[in-house]
Image (tube, helix red, strand yellow):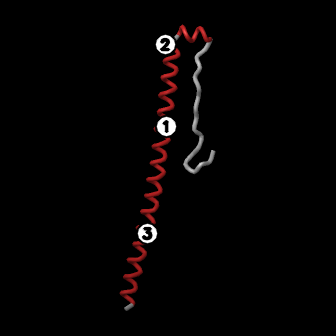
Amino acid sequence: MALKKAYADIILNTEKEAAKRIMVSERKAVWLEYELKVAKEDAVQMLIRVKQMMDCKTNTSAASALGTCFLPVTTNNSNFFGYA
């Protein structure tokens, strides 16, 4: 009887450890998804900024008439947990 209980305890502990590893992996997957989303958003913002700079340089007549090129900067400072 004691042997069966020992085996049952071993199996239960193994299942608990496996469940913990799965939970950690799932949290990591969510975090990586978030980081990928933020990286994509940042890349789009950088491409828009580069396009604006290129448009500004190619439109020298418009830039000289205005004195400078207007390059608005938009940032998203929120993070995954909503803190600034």
Q: Nearer the viewer, residue 68 or 4?
A: 68
Is residue 18 shown above or below 6?
above
Circle nearer the N terminus (2, 1): 1
Residue occupying image coordinates x 49% and y 17%: 55
- CA separation, marks 3 and 1? 37 Å
Element class at badge 3: helix
State if disc 2 and disc 3 touch (CB < 8 Å). Answer: no
Circle nearer the N terminus (3, 1): 3
Which circle marks residue 41 in the picture?
Answer: 1
**Residue tagged 3:** 17
Is residue 56 shown above or below 45?
above
Element class at badge 2: helix
Q: Nearer the viewer, residue 6 or 78?
A: 78
Place of residue 78 in the rendered image (x, y in percent of width and height, measured from the top left): 59, 43
Place of residue 81 in the rendered image (x, y in percent of width and height, measured from the top left): 57, 51
Residue occupying image coordinates x 48% and y 47%: 34
Q: Residues within 10 Å of mark 1 (few under 14, many from 20)?
A: some
- Left or right, 7 with respect to 80, comes to left
- CA separation, marks 2 and 1? 26 Å
**Residue tagged 2:** 58
Callout 3 amino acid: Glu
State if disc 1 and disc 3 touch (CB < 8 Å). Answer: no
Element class at badge 1: helix
Quadrant of image for the C terminus: top right
Callout 1 amino acid: Glu
Residue 73: quadrant of the picture = top right
